[in-house]
Image: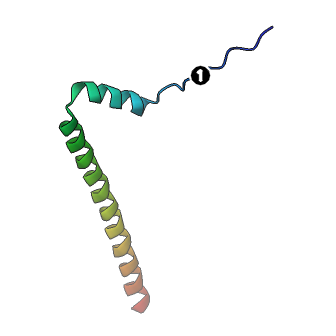
Amino acid sequence: MQAAPVRATAIPSFTDALRAVESLLMSSGQRTARRNAWTSVLEDRRRAKDRVEAQRVLEQQAAVRS
């Protein structure tokens, strides 16, 4: 009995597949704009999370001092 042959190339991830489709459908400028927009969304989410955390800390401090 022989072992199964080892695959030389990795199976592309779902993200890789989406990027390949994206490159076929969109021009370079559109891809850049979409990625920049998504980066902005992620940054806005991070800042909102930081604001909520800062507000929670401030409220805890106010409660301790009262």
> To which residue does mark 1 refer?
8
The residue sitting at 26% across, 24% down in the picture is: 24
Position of residue 22 measured from the top left corner of the image (x, y, whole percent)? 28, 29
- The spot of residue 23 in percent (x, y) is 28, 29
Look at the picture and state if 13 lies above or below 7: below
Label 1: few (<14), some or many (≥20) within 10 Å? few
- Residue drawn at x 30%, y 57% is 43
Give the number of callouts.
1
- Give the image quarter of residue 62: bottom left
Provide residue 64's location: percent of width, then percent of height: 44, 87
In terms of depth relative to the viewer, which is nearer, 51 or 1? 1
Task: Tell which residue pokes out farthest to the right in this image.
Answer: 1
Image quarter hosting the C terminus: bottom left
Q: Is residue 8 above or below residue 43?
A: above
The quarter holding residue 19 reads top left
Amino acid type, label 1: Ala
Residue 28: image x %, image y %?
22, 35
Residue 63, above or below 11: below
Image vertical order of residue 36 relative to residue 55, above or below: above
